[in-house]
Image (cartoon, helix red, strand yellow):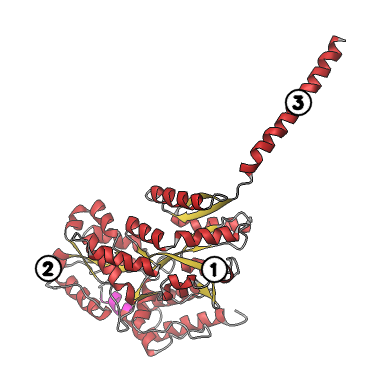
Amino acid sequence: MVKIANLRRFVICGLLGLLLTGVVSCLKSPSAKTPQLEFWTMQLQPKFNEYFKDAIGKFETANPGIKVHWVDVPWGAMQGKIQAAMGAKTAPDVVNLNPDFAIQLAARNAWLDLDPLLTKGENREYIPSIWQAGTINGKAFSLPWYLTTNITIYNQELFTKAGIPKPPTTYQELAQAAKQIKEKTGKYAFFTTFVAEDTNDVLESMVQMGVQLTDKQGKAAFNTPAGRAAFQYWVDLYKQGLLPKEALTQGHQQGIQLYQAGETAMLFAGAPFIETIVKNAPQIGKVSGVAPQITGQTGKKGVAVMNLVIPRTTKMPDAAVKFAVFITNTANQLAFAQASDTLPSNVKAVADYQTKLAGNNDTSPLDRGKSISAEQLSQSEILIPPLKNINVLKKAIYENLQAAILGEKTVEQAVTTAATTWNAVQSPGG
């Protein structure tokens, strides 16, 4: 009887335990069901932890039914990570990407079409040319966020030794300066890379020199006298020994190292990089000056954009759009620009940023660089058109340019082959 009583007590206790567990589950369920929006950025931790803690806190206070989970991803890991997440249907709700990669996935219908979800006129809050870079077939797939425009950071000691009073402003002047600096100092004027996977610098220089990359149908438009002249420009610089040989094999990181070692006279980078030079190479930092971005006869200057996209798989489209608009509004863009030394893409934020810079009496290279960046923003644009196969175009141009540099092809052959390769990809069967 005792055993039966004990068994009965055990069963009753077990049932009570299950009931209590159910009660606890019920008590926890409201918080468990609180919508959580996942937001991915690229390499912004830990420097901007306080900024995002504050911004996310304000958003959650204004939207009590939504929690935001911020995940920061290393720069080099983002493409693989977002592709894997989308394949596994575990993608975040809002993602920070650059247009080059975002456009590739936009062509596969990966991102939410923002037009039906944005209130009327919201697109007019952003710089028009920057907004346009986040559209494909006339539909918006991203919101512009922060911007950077390259400036010329230059070694004033090397310029003095070379007898050059001021930095070049055009590619024609750059070639002349490269020759004079090499002759007078034995150093290279600058480093650029012909590695397709690394940067868009050479491609952008072609546009600045007056080359049209593609026509309205997306076919190659650079097999022209202007296109051949742009190829010839880089071939001549290399063959004349005015560019380091590593340009064929090394990426932009090599250019940074050479400048910081005092082996090149110029570095083309964003204004915030001045702080990096001062930290890594104090002696070079002390003699570094700043000047506007080099351009061609078009006068065009390039701008790099970081944007926010929303995967089509999000279960919270309205909340995701609301958050993306919040992060890119005037107040938040201005605050982030000041914290990061980047530029805002919101029209009102740009005006406020320029006003604040005008009232700043600091004459440090960083502040002068920031002022130059802001001033040239009105002349800046996305130089590379939003094309779904942009990497193929870039590879075709860079590989054939390398072949011309090495003497494996004439410039005319290189340009023709690059155009043929691109058109084959763009054709209906390509």
- Which residue lies under the disc numbered 2? 160
Q: Position of residue 412 (x, y in %)?
A: 40, 86
The extreme bottom residue here reads: 225
Task: Tell me the amino acid under the disc marked 1.
Answer: Leu
Asked where in the image residue 252 lies, by quadrant, the reply is bottom left
Residue 75: say if magenta.
no
Q: Position of residue 195 (x, y in %)?
A: 40, 68
Circle 2/circle 1 CB separation < 8 Å: no
Decide which of 42, 5 is in the foreground and name it: 5
Residue 16's mark? 3
Task: Tell me the amino acid under the disc marked 2.
Answer: Thr
Counting residues from the N terminus, which is met first, the one under dot 3 or under dot 1? 3
Q: Is residue 355 left or right of residue 310?
A: left
The extreme right residue here reads: 1
Q: Is residue 272 left or right of residue 62?
A: left
The residue that appears at 42% across and 49% down in the rendered structure is: 54
Asked where in the image residue 204 lies, by quadrant, the reply is bottom left
The residue that appears at 69% across and 38% down in the rendered structure is: 26
